[in-house]
Amino acid sequence: VHNPFRLPHYKPVPFPLPVVMVRRHSSAAVSSFVEAVKSGPSLQDFLLETHSPSNKTAATHQEVDLPSSFIHKHSEHTIGANRSVFVETYGCQMNVSDSEIVTAVMQKAGFTAAPSAEQADVIFVNTCAIRDNAEQKVWTRLHYLKGLKQKNKHNKKVIGVLGCMAERLKTQLLESDCLVDMVVGPDAYRSLPALLAQVDGGSAAMNVQLSLDETYADIAPVRHSDNRLSAYLSIMRGCDNMCSYCIVPFTRGRERSRPVASIVDEVRALSDQGFKEVVLLGQNVNSYNDLQEVGDTALGDSDVLTTGFRNMAKRRRGYRFAELVDKISQVDPELRIRFTSPHPKDFPDDLLHVIKERPNVCNSLHIPAQSGNSDVLQRMRRLYTREAYLDLIEHVRQLLPDVGLSSDFISGFCGETEAEHQDTISLLKTVKYDTAFMFLYSMREKTHAHRHLVDDVPLDVKRRRQQEVTDTFYSLLTQKTKAEIGNRHLVLVEGKSRRSASELVGRTDTNKKVVFPDMTVLPTFTTPQMRPTGEPATKVPIAVGDYVVVDIEGAQGMTMRGRPVARTTLVQYSLLAPESGTAWRVSRPP
């Protein structure tokens, strides 16, 4: 049976296009291509584009931004007419944010959102490639979607793989038993309508070109959250760290930061829409560095790094992360600000002071250690030692006594000995994290470890070590969570508890989960000694998005249980809270 998607029937278009594969003998594709060329740019258009000052970077790095006139008018405006799209997301928060960008691009092209893959005309699977297990989940899903497509041949569903797995595997996805019609990397989402036009013409399509400047700053994301409480906001893309185990620099490209003004405008828009929390995102979010703006000149032109940490490459000073956080914190004092995922090297004192001085910048830091052994850290190319990391943790806790700390750990990295593993266990016992994410090491192609190291720790040993790390973390967490009993916290109400409709759930400033009764409370919080008493007529109900003062009365695992005292505002609470932190001890109610 003739398979129209076999790669021998394709060849790259010999043109400065994105990487698009066109079938050699498809008359529909040929006609489509000829029409595009006729309506496309002239030689003069390309010369103007090349010499335009805004395209100097692209020309230097042999990257060409296609003039808008080249894209089919049909694909730009009508390709989505009477068609729906469904976007599935796997992996990190950045992928969730990217899916919101994809939805915006598709809506502009005329597509409506489908409630499920089964009901969609176009299905996009936004993927993660950080570990092999993540990719296996996607392969399983693609086989299911292929079966779905075969059952609905009259509907002609289109299946596309987006994101990091698309960037890593490229043509392998098109060769994979006709599972996929299009493959699109994380920097090519603007080209989705044009690529769909290629697929409609009978071709498989691919664009996996990485960019030195794409940030999607001008695209307003279509957010998927129903409660409009918390929003992800991508402020930078890519990573320059080149840790030896990590595929991200190869799937996301070099670091580049969004302009400050575009971020401030989006934060302001989110505030106007009623959001109560913004999570700033980036592969290395605290290395944000907008070179189009001038930062604090008093800090000089050199890198501002955490003491005892090094950078893979020297960076020119622009508008840095601490300055950005300080600026957006002033947009709305009632809007909480969090950020992830950072690197330990980018926690200078000016950032820690912003967190301390701005009540709406959450007192919760993710500081990924990866290992507790200096030799392993060197093989990982993390560019710091165990001692430097512990010095940072001590310094952070001196400035932010109540800070909530989380971390990442990899078990079984190349050459890890039992003694090196025990150093990670001892690091957990020393720091006593509030949250931790623990993984088995998974070798990734193209990485430094794949080229220069040996994945020599047996799988059963990796699993045992990961379990030991997990058990150590949870044993320490139980003690730490119980120590919160008797404390008072400010909680942002997120919604009903999953286990009981009579209870609400929310998070503290330190990112700890609190469950409490859905009951009426005092309307305002006026004194630190306030108790949950008063006449019923003076009390008010609690709503999603409210800030509520909660006294912690119990704890189990990572969840605390409490009793709500009063509604309040973030500003009001911060004025009454002690200077030492965001939580304080209260005598337990009678």
Image (tube, grey):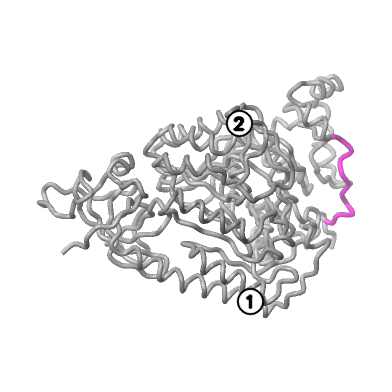
Q: Amino acid at mark 1?
A: Arg
Q: Quadrant of residue 270?
A: top left
The location of residue 67, given as percent across then percent down, is: 75, 27
Q: Residue 567: horizontal and vertical position, in percent?
A: 25, 47
Q: Compared with residue 300, is residue 421 higher up or lower down, i.e. above or below?
A: below
Q: Residue at x 57, y 42 (%)?
A: 234
Left or right: 541 as drawn, with respect to 110:
left
Q: Residue at x 85, y 47 (%)?
A: 23
Q: Which residue is mark 2?
A: 259
Q: Quadrant of the C terminus?
A: bottom left
- Classed neighbour count for the residue bearing mark 2: other residues with Cα under 10 Å, few (<14), some (14–19), many (≥20): some
Q: Position of residue 259 (x, y in %)?
A: 60, 31
Mark 1 — residue? 463
Q: Which residues are magenta?
A: 6-16
Q: CA distance from mark 1 to mark 2?
A: 43 Å
Which numbered disc, 1 or 2, marks the residue that appears first in the sequence? 2
